[in-house]
Image (cartoon, rainbow, N blue to C red):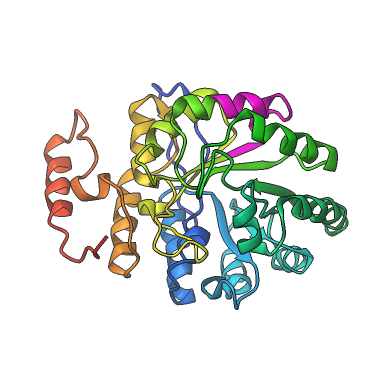
């Protein structure tokens, strides 16, 4: 599985935006597929220029059976040079399995929502913080970078939105523990750009922006707008999910997809940023994923990218072909 050359940065780009692809974890935890489909997805994404993945989770297979093959997926992908491979973990067993599999980093599943924390990992938020402190010492011995999610940082899955007041005590605890690589997740799509700015301002008082990853979900159609705001704010990494796919077994029937990779990539490029991704290859892969029976969202894959000045006819032909894509699964 040889990586494709990364496209050269365009002269007009004002910055390079680092996107991490999380579909291999977020999508297949809710929509199980054979291991070979997961590996092929990664192969296709690498050819599209993706270099950073959240590849899977090392969690109990009886709770998340769709990711029971995490070690096999890592074994197949690990040999590809130039990739950064992360995963999720919920306890020491998962952390050790991640290190054994060759993961570059592991993100602890810390939830800002108490009910979801107990449903997801069987511990309260406070108990999870205590466990994270213990795991930080284990990770140091294993030589693996340990970060943490803050799931539902902006609110959800029920109740009012969260903001500065709710994040501040969690942020102070995380700094005290010594864990400063954070994935702030708008897991239920509560935030619009003003709320994104407020919480990022709070986080930046504790950790540098480059150590932050932000994961916005598109439940309410705000994902691409939030991605543009995150790029403007200079966040280190933005999480995206091919075709807007994803979900969570603890929230059956709810939309749980990440912001659509191909839609976000197009918006960023049109805004003058460089994603170093091949949009056409992303769209082809998103349609391939749909053909594999995985439900998703997104716009660009249905109508094609915005035509460039040179090659408008080809772009319009592409748009027509994708508009008539017949194998689209029901949403």
Looking at the image, the residue that sits furthest to the front is 159
Question: Is residue 220 covered in magenta?
Answer: no
In the picture, measured across the screen, residue 33 lies left or right of residue 316, that is right
- Residue 86 visible to an observer of this rendering: no
Residue 163: quadrant of the picture:
top right
Instruction: Tell me: residue 215, above or below residue 70.
Output: above
Main SS class of the magenta portion in the image:
helix
Residue 182: quadrant of the picture:
top right
| Residue range corresponding to the magenta coloring | 198-213
- Residue 240 visible to an observer of this rendering: yes
Instruction: Tell me: residue 222, above or below residue 33.
Output: above
In the picture, measured across the screen, residue 135 lies left or right of residue 27, that is right
In the depicted view, which residue is nearer to us: 188 or 208? 188
Q: Residue at x 17, y 59 (%)?
A: 325
In the picture, measured across the screen, residue 259 lies left or right of residue 71, that is left
In the depicted view, which residue is nearer to us: 75 or 21? 21
Q: Residue at x 56, y 60 (%)?
A: 55
In the depicted view, which residue is nearer to us: 251 or 82? 251
In the picture, measured across the screen, residue 75 lies left or right of residue 244, that is right
Residue 219 image offset from top left, x and y in percent: 39, 47
Residue 69 image offset from top left, x and y in percent: 57, 75
């Amino acid at each position: 599985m040889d990586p494709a050359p990364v496209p050269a940065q365009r002269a007009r780009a004002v910055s390079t935006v680092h996107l991490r692809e999380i579909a291999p974890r977020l999508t297949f935890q809710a929509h199980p597929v054979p291991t070979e489909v997961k590996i092929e997805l990664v192969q296709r994404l690498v050819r599209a220029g993706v270099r950073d993945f959240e590849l899977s989770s090392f969690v109990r297979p009886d709770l998340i059976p769709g990711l029971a093959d995490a070690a096999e997926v890592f074994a197949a992908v690990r040999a590809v040079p130039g990739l950064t491979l992360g995963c999720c973990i919920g306890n020491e067993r998962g952390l050790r399995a991640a290190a054994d599999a060759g993961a570059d980093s592991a993100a602890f599943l810390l939830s800002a929502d108490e009910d979801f924390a107990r449903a997801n990992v069987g511990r309260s938020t406070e108990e999870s913080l205590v466990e994270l402190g213990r795991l930080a010492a284990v990770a140091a011995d294993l030589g693996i970078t340990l970060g943490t999610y803050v799931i539902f940082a902006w609110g959800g899955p029920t109740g009012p939105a969260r903001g500065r007041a709710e994040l501040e005590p969690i942020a102070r605890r995380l700094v005290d523990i010594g864990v400063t690589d954070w994935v702030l997740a708008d897991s239920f799509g509560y935030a619009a750009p003003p709320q994104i700015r407020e919480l990022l301002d709070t986080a930046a008082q504790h950790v540098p922006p480059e150590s932050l990853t932000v994961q916005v979900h598109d439940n309410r159609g705000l994902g691409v707008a939030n991605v543009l705001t995150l790029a403007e704010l200079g966040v280190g990494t933005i999480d995206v999910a091919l075709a807007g796919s994803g979900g969570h077994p603890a929230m059956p029937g709810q939309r749980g997809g990440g912001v659509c990779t191909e839609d976000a990539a197009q918006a960023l490029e049109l805004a003058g940023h460089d994603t170093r991704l091949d949009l056409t290859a992303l769209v082809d892969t998103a349609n391939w994923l749909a053909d594999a029976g995985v439900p998703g969202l997104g716009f660009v894959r249905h109508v094609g990218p915005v035509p460039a000045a040179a090659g408008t006819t080809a772009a319009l032909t592409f748009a027509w072909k994708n508009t008539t894509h017949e194998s689209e699964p029901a949403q």
